Every structure is written in structure tokens, then in C-alpha cells.
Image: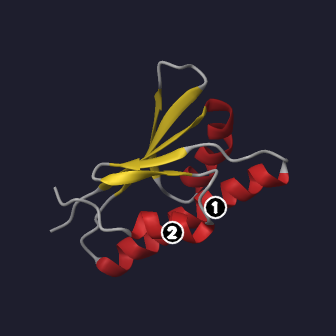
Amino acid sequence: MTYEQNIAIDIPADEATALLPLLQQSGFTTQSIQRRDLDWQTIVVVIRDLGEIAGSVAAIIALAEKINAYRESMRRQGKTPRGTLRRPGQPPLDLALATDQEVLEWLLRTPPQP
């Protein structure tokens, strides 16, 4: 059985312009949702066909690398990376406070089954 996993990244709109292209260039399907607060938006990253363990783990590791690259690029600009990872059934993860390893571990946690 295969299914897709949706991971929401709540992020300031100006920083989304840095993260969104990184994700799209890496082949991730994304949807951008404007929130009522015009300074923030939600990027929904969709990972499909999670039925094959090796393929899904590789996709999640690639996603973690892209998110961590975005965070590093913000730090190089002297900014604190702002944003939160969200997924049902899992506590949110603050991108400003998490380590690269914590981002990976959060993404690798088994998501709720559909």
C-alpha cells in the first residue's frame, strides 16, 4: 500500500521565497497557502508513494537537507530562520530552535497511517 505524506511548514512570506525554490528544484511537490496574517504562509510539502521504505527514507532525508540548507542560508544572512514544521499527530518543531539532527528526526518519525 502506498500513500502520501503532507508536511506543513509555516514560514514568513519573505523567507518562503528562499525555501520554496529549494524544495521545487529538488522535485518535491509543494502547495503554498496564504494565511490570514499576510506576513506568513504555509508551504505544504507532499511526498508520494511512501510504500517503499528505502525510497521514502531517501525523500525525507532529502527534504531535511533542503530545510537545513534554507536555515543555514538565513544564518549566513545574519537572520534567525523562522518557521514551524507541522504534521497531524506530532508536536510542532520550531526551525529557529531545532538542530539539523532534530529536523531530520522529526521528519523521520512515523506519521499517522491514513
Task: Establish if 33 lies above or below 75.
Answer: above
- Name the amino acid type tagged 2: Leu
Residue matched to label 1: 68
Q: Position of residue 4 (x, y in %)?
A: 28, 57
Q: Is residue 71 visible?
A: yes
Residue matched to label 2: 104
CB atoms of marks 2 and 1 within 8 Å:
yes
**Left or right: 7 in relation to 82:** left
The mark found on residue 91 in the picture is: none
Q: Position of residue 34 (x, y in %)?
A: 49, 25
Q: Position of residue 35 (x, y in %)?
A: 47, 24
**Left or right: 97 in relation to 85:** right
Check the picture and name the quadrant holding the C terminus: bottom left
Q: Secondary structure at mark 1?
A: helix
Residue closest to the far bottom: 54
Check the picture and name the quadrant holding the N terminus: bottom left
Sequence-wise first label, 2 or 1? 1
Q: Secondary structure at mark 2?
A: helix
Q: Is residue 62 visible?
A: no
Q: Position of residue 6 (x, y in %)?
A: 35, 50
- At horizontal 64% and vertical 50% (from top left) the residue drawn is 96
Among the 4 quarters of the image, the one containing residue 64: bottom right
- Name the amino acid type tagged 1: Asn
- At horizontal 46% and vertical 70% (from top left) the residue drawn is 105
